[in-house]
Image (spheres, rainbow, N blue to C red):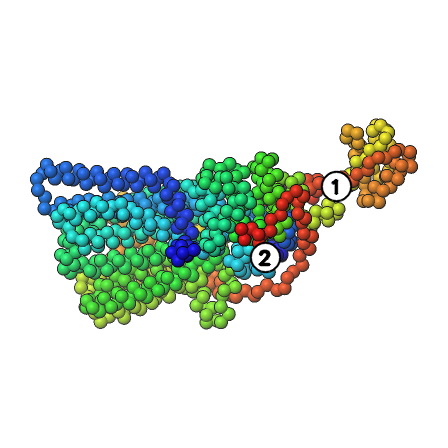
Amino acid sequence: MTALARVIRKLDGAMNPVAVRELRQAVRSGVVTIGFVLFVLALLGAMGMYLLDQDAGGTELEGGREIFTLLTGILVAASVGLLPIYTGTRLAAERGGVNADLLFITTLSPGRIVRGKMLAAAMLTVMVFSACAPFVTFTYLLRGIDFPTIFLVIAASFLLSVTASQLAIFLAALPVSVYVRVLIWLAFAGMMMALLPALFDGHSGVLSSIIIWGVNGWAGLWEAWPQLGTLLALDIVALGLFHVLTVALFMPPAANRTLRVRIYLTIAWLVSGVLAAAWADELGFDEPMALWGYGWWGFLACCMIVAVSERTSWGPRITRTIPANPLLRAGAFVLYTGAAGGVTWVVIMILLTAAALGSGMGGMTTMTWGPGIREDVEILMGLTFFAFAYSMTAALLRRYVLRRILPERHTGALAALLLCLGCFLPLLAALVLYSGSRWRGGPHAIAGRAGWWNALNPFMLWEHDCRSLCTRTALVWAAVAALLSVPWYVEQVVLFRRSRPPEGPGETPEAPAPAAVPDGLELVDDDERKAE
Amino acid sequence: MDVSVRNLKRYFGKTRAVDDISFAFSAGHIFGFVGPNGAGKTTAMRIIATIDEPTAGDATVNGVSVVQDPEKARRLIGFMPDSLPTHKDITVHEYIDFFARAYGVDSGRRDKVVAGVEEFTTLTGIRDKTLRALSKGMKQRVSLARAMVHDPAVLILDEPAAGLDPRARIELRELLKILAARGKAILVSSHILTELAEICDGTVIIEQGRILRAGTMDEILAHDAPHRTVAIRTLEPVEVLHRRLLEMPGVSGARIAGPLVEADIDGADEACGRVLADLVAAGLHVTEFVHRRAGLEDLFMHVTKGQVQ
C-alpha cells in the first residue's frame, strides 16, 4: 500500500459516518439534483436578462455591482432558505421512524450525529456556492465590484447559511407532531423570507450596504465594525446554542440532556460579557454592556419556563455520575438536568447579570439609552418575577392537580397556557363588566389602563402607567409561589444523590447447554472469516 | 459471554410494561422470548439493547451493565428492531457500510467485514439496490446484516420473522442456527411458535410484563405439559386399538390418526409404561409406541391468558 493510499484510508476512517451517508443520499436524491439544476438556471437566467437589458439601455458603469447583488440574493435565498429546509425535512423524516433508534444503538455519540448532519449541510452549501462561483467571477469582469467585497459578502452569506442549517436541524429534532412540524417549517420559511430584505434592502441592508460602499468605503463608516461584530457574535452564539440544543434533543430521555446546554450558555454569557465590557470601555459609553445585559436577562427569564419542564427525579444513568463531594454535588445540581436545578441556575444567572450590569455601567457615560436604563431594569425585573411566578405555578399545578394527566415535560406548555389566560381572561372580564358604563373610550381605553385586569399581564410592563402595579403583583405572586414550592424543591435536592453500584449478581436461571451445529450446514469459523 | 437480566422493571405511569423479570442465557444459545401482544417483550428488548432505561433492575452482558455502562454494552450487542429500515436514496451496501463506520469498524478491514456480512446474509447480489426497492424479506436480511456488522457477541432480534414468506423464514432460521453455532448468544421474539420451538434452546414466556415460564425447552415442556401424548400402532385394526384404549384407566382421550391411534395419557413416563404393558397384556401386538411432546404452542396456550394491561 502506498503512502498516499494509507493517508486516504486514514482520512476515510476519520470521516464522520453520518456526513458520509448524508452526502451519499444527497447525491442520489432527485430533489437535490432538480434543485441544483434549477438554481444554476436561475443564476443563468438572471444574469442573461440583466445583460440583455444592459444592451438595450446603453453603458452601465455599476453593472458588476448590480448583478453581484442580484446573484447574491439568489444564492442567499437558496442557501439560507431551501437548503436548510431540505436538511431539516430529511432529518425530521428520519427522526419519525425506527431509524432514530438505530442511531442510538450504535456507538456514535449524539454530538457526532449532529456534527455529521451539520457537516453534510455545510458541504452541500459549499457545492451551491461553488456552482455560483463562475457567475460571481464574471461580475468581477464587469465594473463596480472588487474582490475583497466579493469575498466578505460570500463569507458572510456562508456563515448565515450554516447557521440557518443548524437552526433547521434543531427544529427538525424537536419532538412534535407532524402538524406542528408543518407549522414550524412554514414559520421558518417566513422568517428566512423576512431576513432577505434585512440583508439586501438598499443602503440599510447589511450585505447590500457592503456591496454598495465596497469594503474600503464601508469600513470607513463608524457603525460598520460594531454592526458586523455584533452580528458575527450573535451568529456564532446562535450557531453554538442551536448545536448544543440539538445534541440535547438527540440524547435519550434518560441522559443528562441539559448539562452541555447550561455549560455552553454559562461560557457564552461570560465570554460575551467580557467582550461587551471591553468594547464599552473602549468606546467610553455603555450601549454594548446594556445590549448584552438586556439580551441575556430577557433570554434567561424565558429559560425559566423551559427549566420547569425538566425531570424531577433521575435515573441510574445520571445518578451514577453525581459527585459524592457535597460541594461538587451542589454544582452538579445546578448544571445537571432537573427542574429545581434549572430554576436555580436561571436565578443565579439573572442575579449575576444584574450585578454585572450594575457594576459595568456604573462609571460610564450613557448615550441614547441613559435616561431609560432605570425603566429598562424595572421592566426586566418585572419580567423575571412574572416568569418565575408563572413557571412555578405551572409546576405546582402539575404536581398537586394534574399529576396523572400531564407529563413533566409539558409543564412549560402549561406555564405558557397560564400566561395566555393571565393576559386575556381578566381583560375579558373587565370588558364585560365595564364596557360602556365606566369609560367612554371603549375597549381600547380599558385595555390600556392600570387596573386589576392588567395585573397579571407581563406585556403591560412596557406601559408606564401599569408598570408599578404589574411589578408589585408579580413580586407578591412570585414570593407566594416560591414559598409553596419549597417542598417541591427540597424533594429534588434530597433525591439528587449518587447511586450505589449494584450489589453482587442476583439469582438468575441457569443457561442451557450450547447448541449443536445444525446438520448439513457448513460451519465457518469467525476468525477464518475475518482473515479472508 | 453471558447475558443476565435481573429484576428488570419498566413502568409507564400505572402501566407495568415489564414487571420484575429475571432470566439468563449464554453464548451458543438461542433463547425464545414469547408472549401475547403488549406483554412487554419489545420494552424488555429495548432496555437490553440500551435504547430505553429501566425503572429498576439491570441487565448485564458479560458483566457489563446496560444501565451503568450503556456505551460499552452497545459494542457487545446487535439489535434488530421490529421495524424495517426506511432510509431514502441509499443502497444496501452503503447502508451497511454506514453502520460499520458508526460502530467504528477499522477502515482497513471495513470493506472485507461489510462484504462478509453481505455474503453471510446473501445480500451480495442486491448490494447496489436502494432500500426502498427491497421486499420485506430482503429488508429483514438487511436489518440482520446491520445488527451483525460489528460482530457483536449478543444478538437481540425483535420479531425477525414477521411478514416473511415460508422460504425466507426457513432461511432466517438456518442463519440463526449458524450464528448460535458460532457462539453468539441470541434472544429472539416471535409469534411463530412452531419455528421458535425448532431452533430455541430455551424460552421465556411473558404476559402482562411478568414471566410465566423460563428455562430450557425440555424443562418447561416436562414441567408444564398437561398430559403425555403417544402414537400407537398395532397389527390389529385401529378401531380395536381405539376402543381398547378408551376403556383403559389413565387414558383421558384417544383418536384415530390414519394407521395410528393417538392417546392422551394422564401422568408421566410411568403412566405411559403402564399403558404399554396393559396393551401387551391384553394381547395386542404393539409395533410402534412413540412419545409425542407437547409443542410450544400448546404450552403457550396453557400458561397464558391473553390478557393485556
Image position of A102 with respect to A45: above or below: below
Label 2 environment density (alpha carbons within 10 Å; few <14, some 14–19, many ≥20): many
Q: Decide: marks 1, 2 in contact (CB < 8 A)? A: no
Q: Which mark is residue B95?
A: none
Going from the N terminus, do you reach mark 1 or mark 2 first?
Answer: 2
Q: Residue furthest front?
A: A2
Q: Amino acid at mark 1?
A: Arg
> Would residue A201 be found to the left or right of residue B286 on screen?
left
Q: Which mark is residue B293?
A: 1
Chain letter of disc 2?
A: B
Between A519 and A471, the one lying in front of the other is A519
Dot 2: what SS? strand
Q: Please provide percent x and percent y for residue A509.
A: 68, 55
Q: Compute the Cα span from label 1 to label 2.
A: 33 Å
> Would residue A24 be found to the left or right of residue A196 on screen?
right
Chain letter of disc 1?
A: B
Q: Are marks 1 and 2 on the same chain?
A: yes
Q: Please state, as top left, top right, bottom left or bottom right, where the C terminus of chain B lies in the image.
A: top right
Residue of label 2: B61
Residue depicted at 24% across the width and 47% down the height: A133
